[in-house]
């Protein structure tokens, strides 16, 4: 191991420990943004802060060259109530660094920061490299990567740091939440009056339960719909409800546009259907993309991810890849192995060396 790599790894781990000590719940990332600014500033790296998002360009940025974005988030969810350790105490035990956000996605973030530092002063890069540490990923907020992108130069592709055990998530399901309402007519239950909106809703709910989309993705499998909430406005036992509302969680593979899915649904149900948002779309990067080819050459495998990330908000090819394990995210006593961070930095550098 080179001395430079060893220093990068030590600094990354120290940065992660400091980030863990500061609560950085979504929309409350002010202090961790400050830590990241200070970290870059101490290394004489010009950087910009917009809201709670921090980004920096490689020293010899050249607008004539294509640009790779390295992105991960520094916000966290709130600690699981079953924590037995202090979520804000970065304790290392048996090679594990414990703490809220250590695995999701602090380890990824500091590994990408270290990778950026490695390439920052290289004059011979074929690509520009930008690092962006962004906010509000955990709530898919509008003041994170989506807010930051207009401040950045043109981006050609990205590596999104999320815990994937350094395997390559080349596709990601889209998430669309639907608010549905069936309409009937109120009446007195004892006199058999009215038109029961619940019964009308049940027919549509049964359709959502049984419908199967034709296009099945090799990476993500079939698109899925799940009814997750149902309610009526009136609470009286003796009133036939005029309106029944229900919520449908849809997970869409990369073979469908959201608009197609909405059209299919509206052609098959009577209920009113309104999408809350169409921002978190399914995404995929070609397995022939240089990033994926480089990863494959390093023995990385690729797969389709069932979870969403800031990758969904990027209008350019992006590869989700990072140290840590998604199964540990949002769990009590969250941790990442120190060795995962060290190997993550090495692999990120090796991957970029193959294309830059």
Image: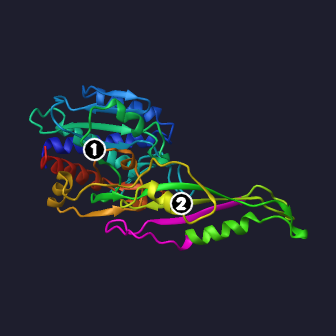
The structure's colour scheme is rainbow
The quadrant holding residue 154 is top left
Q: Nearer the viewer, residue 53 or 266?
A: 266
Q: Nearer the viewer, residue 104 or 146?
A: 146
Q: Are marks 2 and 1 in contact (CB under 8 Å)?
A: no
Region rendered in magenta? 209-231
Residue that label 1 marks:
112
Residue 185 shown left or right of residue 87 in the figure: right
Which secondary structure, mark 2? Answer: strand
Q: Residue at x 40, y 30 (%)?
A: 34
In percent of width and height, residue 218 lies at 31, 69
Q: Residue at x 37, y 69 (%)?
A: 216
In percent of width and height, residue 184 lies at 75, 61
Residue that label 2 marks:
249
Is 211 one of the magenta-colored residues? yes
Residue 36 seen in this snapshot: no
Considering every residue shown, the one lying at the far bottom of the view is 210
């Amino acid at each position: 191991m080179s001395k430079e790599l060893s220093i990068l790894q030590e600094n990354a781990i120290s940065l992660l420990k400091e980030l863990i000590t500061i609560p950085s719940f979504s929309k409350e990332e002010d202090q961790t943004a400050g830590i990241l600014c200070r970290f870059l500033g101490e290394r004489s790296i010009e950087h910009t802060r917009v809201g709670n998002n921090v980004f920096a360009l490689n020293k010899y940025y050249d607008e004539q060259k294509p640009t790779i974005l390295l992105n991960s988030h520094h916000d966290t969810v709130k600690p699981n109530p079953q924590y037995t350790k202090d979520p804000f105490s970065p304790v290392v035990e048996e090679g594990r660094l414990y703490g809220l956000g250590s695995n999701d996605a602090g380890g990824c973030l500091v590994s990408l920061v270290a990778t950026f530092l490695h390439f920052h002063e290289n004059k011979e890069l074929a690509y520009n490299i930008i690092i962006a540490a962004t906010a509000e990923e955990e709530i898919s907020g509008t003041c994170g990567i989506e807010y930051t992108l207009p401040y950045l130069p043109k981006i050609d592709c990205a590596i999104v740091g999320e815990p994937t055990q350094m395997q390559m998530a080349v596709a990601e399901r889209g998430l669309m939440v639907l608010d549905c309402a069936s309409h009937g007519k109120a009446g007195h239950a004892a006199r058999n009056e009215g038109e029961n909106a619940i019964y009308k809703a049940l027919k549509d709910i049964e359709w959502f339960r049984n419908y199967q989309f034709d296009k099945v993705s090799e990476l993500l499998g079939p698109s899925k719909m799940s009814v997750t909430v149902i309610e009526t406005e009136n609470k009286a036992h003796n009133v036939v409800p005029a309106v029944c509302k229900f919520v449908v969680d849809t997970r869409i593979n990369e073979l469908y546009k959201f608009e197609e899915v909405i059209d299919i649904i509206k052609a098959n149900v009577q209920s009113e259907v309104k999408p809350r948002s169409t921002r978190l779309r399914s995404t995929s990067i070609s397995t022939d993309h240089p990033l994926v080819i480089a990863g494959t050459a390093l023995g990385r495998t690729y797969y389709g991810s069932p979870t969403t990330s800031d990758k969904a908000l990027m209008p350019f090819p992006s590869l989700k890849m990072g140290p840590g394990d998604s199964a540990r995210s949002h769990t009590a006593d969250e941790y990442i192995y120190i060795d995962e961070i060290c190997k993550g930095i090495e692999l990120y550098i090796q991957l970029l060396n193959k294309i830059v």
